[in-house]
Image (cartoon, rainbow, N blue to C red):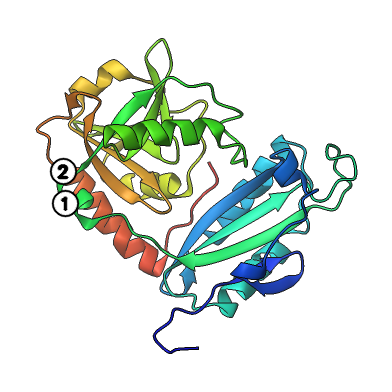
Amino acid sequence: MNEREPRTSIYYVNGRFLPAAQAALGVDDLGLVRGYGVFEVLRTYGVRPFGLRAHLERLQRSAAQIELALPGSLEEIGQIVEATLAQNDGCDVTARVIVTGGSSGTFLMPEDRPSLLVMVEPVRPFPESLYQTGASLITVDLPRFMPTVKSLNYVTAIRGQRRAKQAGAVEALYCDPQGWLSECTTSNLFLVRGDQLITPTGEVLPGITRAAVLELAADLLEVVERPVHCSELAQADELFITSTTKEILPIVRVDDQTIAAGRVGGRTQQLSELFCQAVRQEPIVLLSR
């Protein structure tokens, strides 16, 4: 192989390490024919996987909610994730952990043979300009399937992402007919108002980066977890979203509404700096939320 060519990623599929191009599931797998499965996406900072245990605990909670058996203990799955990272150049990569219902002769009912995949790829960072000048969101009212489960059913999220892309926005923010906000298609939402850091509760996925931000902010701001109405955007001093791949991404516009002065706020910058320091050392306990 030419030294200038990137190394092919190695995936884990049901007990085997395979080049990405050879990795596959059977066409009778319930993840394919029924969308029956759950997943997690974590990343490394350098070679250190951030929040691995917290991600696996959320994977376990998601699986339990859809009555899907895991193919091993969290310790065993964690060892597989780390072994897959070791098979690759594990520096600044994402690891996608997927559990499906496995092969099914009826194409419907699980046969207690869940599939486990671990897919490793280099991190694809968002443009630095978005962190310096801020990004925009659009609001969408779309039906959501079990929002507290990180399932393979991403129909609603894909529809929202398409609308966001068409509008030149980075994300779509779910807003119900009564104006209550929850989260974005792949991110959690935060508002800063005065000395309060506010984030929606209820039907939201408990993000791992969200949990880290809440812990980092505890000594700086009054942390408030409660329902948030779209009318509060007009009073927000700052707005940002969080996720594994976006980290802390400042938001300066939602639909046609400019947030505060339309610039990245000081609290957002402060939390971003703290988060950057923390993930390189990972002193955060990352309590389950």
Q: What element carries label 1?
A: helix
Name the amino acid, label 2: Val
**Observer-nearest of 98 and 224:** 98
* Quarter where residue 251 is shown: top left
Name the amino acid, label 1: Gln
Disc 2: CA contacts within 10 A as few (<14), some (14-19) or many (>=20): many
**Observer-nearest of 180 and 87:** 87
Above/below status of 10 relative to 272: below
Q: What element carries label 2?
A: loop
Residue at image point 47% right, 31% down: 159
Residue wearing tag 1: 132
Give percent across and percent down for residue 264.
16, 43
Give percent across and percent down for residue 253.
21, 32
Residue 75 shown left or right of residue 284 in the figure = right
User: Which badge, 1 or 2, comes first in the chain's sequence?
Assistant: 1
Residue wearing tag 2: 264
Residue 272 shown left or right of residue 19 in the figure = left
**Observer-nearest of 64 and 165:** 165
